[in-house]
Amino acid sequence: MRNWSGKGMLGVILVFVSTVSGCQRGVFSFGDSLTDTGNLYFISPRQSPDCLLPPYGRTHFHHPSGRCSDGRLIVDFLAHSLGLPYLKPYLAFKNAALPLPDLHHGLNFAVAGATALDTAFFQERGFTVDVTTNFSLRVQLDWFKEFLPSLCNSSSSCKKVIGSSLFIVGEIGGNDYGYPLSGTTAFEDLVTYIPQVISVITSAIRELIHLGAVTLMVPGSLPLGCNPAYLTTFATMDENQYDQAGCLKWLNTFYEYHNQLLQIELNRLRVLYPLTNIIYADYFNCALQFYYAPEQFGFGGNVLKVCCGGGGPYNYNETAKCGDAGVVACDDPSKYVSWDGYHLTEAAYRWMTKGLLDGPYTIPKFNISCFTGETIGDFNSYAME
């Protein structure tokens, strides 16, 4: 396996350092399982791991909520910080399962298992594609446009509502790369997918801007070289393949490359649309600190181990996943970064949100002071709704 190095891959990335301000009155989100707040309930077949089974949701909701974690996600904490209710899943209303809420607060279009690229892209290349991956970013954007008449009744009123809302576009792309990673670890093969994924993301951003979006948050990829499922799949006896935290260097380099190319494209969009606020959310470095300094965040023991898993070096077992019969979760998920081997714990997502709002992990800095006059700075006293 090749030991990649990110040095020399890219030139210097232009950084916009102004502070984003303005008062968003709603949140609309797109993405995959890192953002899905319940659309998973309305898709089939069921996924693996199955986030609709206990012990998912045990920490905050005390039952499975359609979120792939033990509790809340970044989008939940962001909504709370903006003084807004948790985002409802769009498919609940599309399928007439629930009455329409106050739609001006926003809605969640993200679907667990979703890809940026359409299903046909992978099928044409011979990959076996689950039905759940039909809910691509393009499909989610079409849902948003389909939903618009329920939100506003004229072009001018739509522009006003959309212009005063925050749009979260991602994180998405991780599932796209899972397909080629199932067959190769060669940089030359994998890297060809990155521009195509980013092209879809930037195209969605442009379309939202043309619809009237002014403030958009675009998260980058997590450091999936620290992901217990991938650490199990790509385990090697070659110690040089791991960094000091025990993460796979070559895999993190790949996702860093994705994030670098994404930031270059976001900078181009900022030039094209100077009146918009396009915020890059640095999920990669925000989460990476958990693995290098876990004690600073209250994470204990082997920080790469899974809370809810079926054994093995990382407590992740492909044949005994969280939610399967006989698989038991840890007593205290707040001591763990990884919940099920793929997704993070509520504690990790809460710390990440704090890093986005109070720390250096958004470009430009995201200012929410005009909403509630508070942030997640006081971690211990943060309201438990």
Image (cartoon, helix red, strand yellow):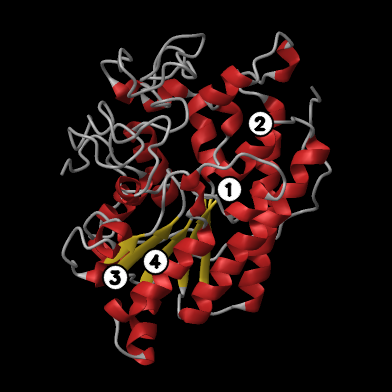
Q: Amino acid at mark 4?
A: Leu
Compare marks 2 and 4 and give the one earlier in the sequence. 4
Q: Residue at x 34, y 73 (%)?
A: 147
- Residue where numbered disc 2 is placed: 182
Earlier in the chain: of badge 4 and badge 1, it is 4
The mark closer to the camera, 2 or 4, is 2
Which element is circle 2 on? loop
Q: What residue is shown with label 4?
A: 166
Q: CA distance from mark 4 to mark 1?
A: 20 Å
Residue 358: give x, y in percent of width and height.
40, 49
Q: Is residue 360 left or right of residue 92?
A: right
Q: Earlier in the sequence, mark 2 or mark 3?
A: 3
Identity, as a three-letter code, of the amino acid under mark 3: Arg
Q: CA distance from mark 1 to mark 2?
A: 15 Å
Coordinates of residue 174 in the picture (x, y in percent): 57, 42
Q: Dot 3 corresponds to which residue? A: 25
Which residue is pictured at 61% across the width and 29% down the height?
A: 225
Real-space Cα distance between discs 3 and 4?
8 Å
Image coords of residue 254 (percent x, y):
70, 38
Q: Amino acid at mark 2?
A: Ser
Q: If the image is split into quadrants, where does the C terminus sit?
A: top left
379 versus 148 height, above or below: above
Q: Earlier in the sequence, mark 3 or mark 4?
A: 3
